[in-house]
Amino acid sequence: GDSVTQTDGQMLLTEGDSLIVNCSYETRQYPALFWYVQYPGEGLQLLLKAAKANDKGINKGFEATYNRETTSFHLEKASVHVSDSAVYYCALSDTVTGTAGGAEHKL
């Protein structure tokens, strides 16, 4: 079935550090890919999405490129801030069946 794997555990970063959270996926379909963020005390929010290969999602200084060759959708930010402290979830959606799966990463 479809699955998503991303960087395990917490990352400890200093203000101004660059960020990469790895996300790889396995699927036989051509899914849409997503990054969600959950800030402390808040609900899940959509951060980025990419509908097809080579699409790049950009929001709030974060970006991720849908790379079908490496089956990856890594989340990157050039310079993090304290306000970026949150749990980040990589997810995919099977556009045919509508099912979804994901994994999480705490920053």
Image: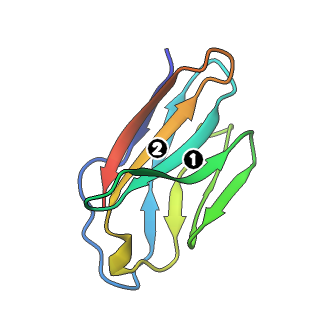
Amino acid at circle 1: Phe
Residue 53 position, x and y percent, is: 74, 41
Q: In the rendered view, does 26 fall on the left or right side of 31?
A: left
Quadrant assignment for the C terminus = bottom left
- Upstream in sequence: badge 2 or badge 1: 1
Residue at 43 percent of width and 34 percent of height = 102
Residue 66 position, x and y percent, is: 66, 46
Label annotation for residue 32: none
Q: Secondary structure at mark 1?
A: loop
What colouring style does the render use? rainbow
Quadrant in which residue 27 is drawn? top right
Circle 2/circle 1 CB separation < 8 Å: yes
Viewer-nearest of discs 2 and 1: 2
Separation (CA) of disc 2 from disc 1: 8 Å
Read off the residue under disc 1.
Answer: 73
Nearest the viewer among 104 and 45 is 45
Residue 95 position, x and y percent, is: 67, 24
Quadrant in which residue 17 is drawn? bottom left
Nearest the viewer among 36 and 76 is 36
Amino acid at circle 2: Cys
Quadrant in which residue 94 is drawn? top right
Q: Mark 2 packing: few (<14 Cα in 10 Å), some, or many (20+)?
A: many
Q: Secondary structure at mark 2?
A: strand
Residue at 53 percent of width and 20 percent of height = 99
Read off the residue under disc 2.
Answer: 90
